[in-house]
Image: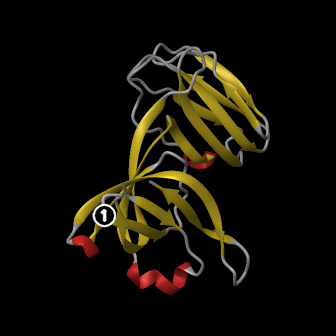
Amino acid sequence: MVVVVVMAIYFEEFQPATMLATLYREDRYVMYSGPVEEIKLESSPSFPYRIAIEWSGQEGALNLVDDDDNEETIPLEDGMRKVSELVMSKNTLPDIDISPEDLKGSIVLEAVHIDGQPEKRAISKSIEIILFPISDIASHAAGSGYQNIKYTIFTKEEISIGDRITFTDHFQGGVSVTVYAKSVTGGVDLEDGHIEYRMVLCG
């Protein structure tokens, strides 16, 4: 079994030793998340869906238009989450208008199933890590032993329980190693007290 501990105290001191890893996870089907002024939807879902809207900002309104020109206007209130009544056909994207035009705020647009249940999808992204392998010998009762490898990883990336991390261990001749996050704790920079990295126990 491979066990990984992801932790750090002074991330910046080890910055020259960073390497790339791939983070895999199942996440909500978020079509857009960011400033309302820059809404650009990702690829269309392959299932009929409604849109869950999360809003933080000034009061305003969002207008949805589906591919059959059906419309729905949803009031935007700070801190709200609301699921549209309008159902979008699979493989289509709605037209979205925000009013007033100068409205300021942050919005999340998530594709959910017709019954309102979230849709999970697999995503992957490259992340920076700092790798410190630790090798020791584990013994069997019969007297034989085997090499056991643990890893300490530093990362600033947000990690969630169940996430899968794959990286190349150059200390073992370039073998590919895959671990899963089992426990996640924010790491505090002791110099100024803010959380700037993640400590993750993986297996």
Horizontal and vertical percent for residue 168? 28, 65
Residue 103 on image: x %, y %: 71, 45
Furthest toward the front, the residue is 142
Q: Which amino acid does label 1 sit on?
A: Gly
Q: Nearer the viewer, residue 124 or 171?
A: 171
- Examine the rendered structure and indicate whether residue 100 appears above or below residue 186: above
The image quarter in which residue 18 lies: bottom left
Report how many numbered discs are placed on residues in the image: 1
In the orientation shown, which residue stands out farthest toward the left? Answer: 173
Q: In this view, does 9 lie above or below 13?
A: above
Q: Which residue is drawn at 38% across and 23% down?
A: 46
Q: Residue at x 58, y 35 (%)?
A: 109
Frontmost residue, 3 versus 19: 3
Instruction: Say which of 88 and 27 sits in front.
Output: 27
| Residue 112 image-quadrant placement | top right
Lateral position of residue 179 relative to residue 60, left or right: left
Point 57% across, 64% down: residue: 198
Rate crowding at label 1 as few (under 14), some (14 to 19) or many (20 or more) other CA atoms within 10 Å. Answer: few
Which residue corresponds to mark 1? 143
Its colouring scheme is secondary structure
Q: Where is residue 17 in the image (x, y as percent from the top left)?
A: 39, 81
Tell me if 184 is positioned left or right of 149 in this view: right
